[in-house]
Amino acid sequence: MISLLCLALFFLTFANNAYTADSRVKIFGTLGDNVTLPCRLDRDTSFSFGGMGTTRIKWTKLEGPSKNVDVLVSMGFHKIKYGQYETRVHLQETDENDATLIINNLQVEDYGIYQCEVINGMDENIIEVEIRMNGVVFPYSPRLGRYNLNFHDAEAACLNQEAVVASFEQLYLSWKGGLDWCNAGWLSDGTVQYPITKPREPCGGKGQGAGLRSYGRQDKSKSRYDVFCFTNGYNGNVFFVDQKMTYPEAVQACQNEGAELAKVGHMFAAWKLKGFDRCDAGWMSDGSVRYPISRPRMKCSPVEAAVRMVGFPDRKHKLYGAYCFKPQQ
Ligand SMILES: *[C@@H]1O[C@H](CO)[C@@H](O)[C@H](O)[C@H]1NC(C)=O
């Protein structure tokens, strides 16, 4: 009986917990965009006394476990805006229950998790809204192996994967989002860098903090590295064909579906932006074999969500499934 009660309490607590990651609204924004962070007070008007009280609204940015940054506070006509947000935020205020925040001209430091608290009398709503980069950065090295691309090869390599060379800001945001990669790659400004979230000896030393490690500007013709590519999505559909095939058979299998083998950019966009998850290795158009894991689990990718890479297996003899891309008509 007691355990049943505990169970009931557990579920009640869970249902009421507005802070769980799943309930968080996600907004995808590009630098320079005006982004809208929705929030409102859902009032049961039959119980309110003609909307008498003043609605109080507070927006904060959650920078860490106990570090909140004030963004905007509003009580009726009184509004205070803070710091970097002072000239760039306002409330939408379509009606008295609307607490929606608009941020103009999105900056790198604006990305992250925001909390909206809106209160009027007995009515209250607390929600979280996350602003995410509208796209995904992925490291790329071709079949030839590590550190084979000069800057011009790097541009072509990203284009071949339906992507472009990533900017410094895009790599920086991905690093903040947890990207850790121990091979250096070109960025669009001609510098060569790599993102480290877990400092360790072979990746620039344990002593250094987490961050972007930079080799600075490099000779665009003579220096050879990997590259960081960026894609902000695709117009179509990525799907898996579940058969054991060689690479040429995989090409054919996609064609039979009116599609083509997916590019690496398609795979990363499907994984990051659409939560694509499939624990089966499949051919990609560049001859690599990969699989996307959004929900880490034993045997697939136990500790982290990632696009896993098997390698560049022998195209004529090794057998895998196929990841296909079908453009929207
Ligand atoms: C953002 O809003 C401002 C002010 O309303 C406007 O001037 C600007 O053109 C908007 N920018 C974009 C990218 O929509």
Image (spheres, rainbow, N blue to C red):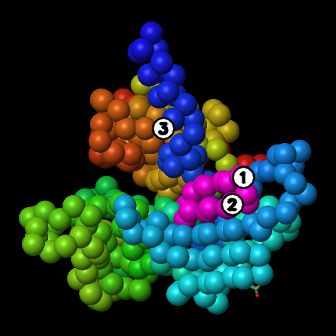
| 38 or 324, nearer to the observer | 38
| 217 or 211, nearer to the observer | 211
Q: Main secondary structure of the magenta part?
A: strand
- Categorize mark 1 by other alpha carbons within 10 Å: few (<14), some (14-19), many (20+): few
Pointers 2 and 1 in contact (C-beta within 8 Å): yes
Q: Which residues are magenta?
A: 114-130
> Alpha carbon of mark 2 to alpha carbon of mark 1: how far?
6 Å
Pointers 3 and 2 in contact (C-beta within 8 Å): no
Q: Residue at x 42, y 14 (%)?
A: 2
> Alpha carbon of mark 3 to alpha carbon of mark 2: how far?
39 Å
Residue 267's disc number: none
Label 1 element class: strand
- For the N terminus, the image quarter is top left
Can residue 315 be seen here? The reply is no
- The residue that mark 2 highlights is 119
> Which quadrant contains ligand 1?
bottom right
Residue 123's disc number: 1
Q: Amino acid at mark 2?
A: Ile
> Alpha carbon of mark 3 to alpha carbon of mark 1: how far?
39 Å
Q: Amino acid at mark 1?
A: Asp
Q: Nearer the viewer, mark 3 or mark 1?
A: 1
**Label located before the other in sequence (3 or 1):** 1
| 312 or 44, nearer to the observer | 44
Q: Does 128 lie within the magenta span?
A: yes
Q: Does 96 lie within the magenta span?
A: no
Q: Residue at x 63, y 76 (%)?
A: 73
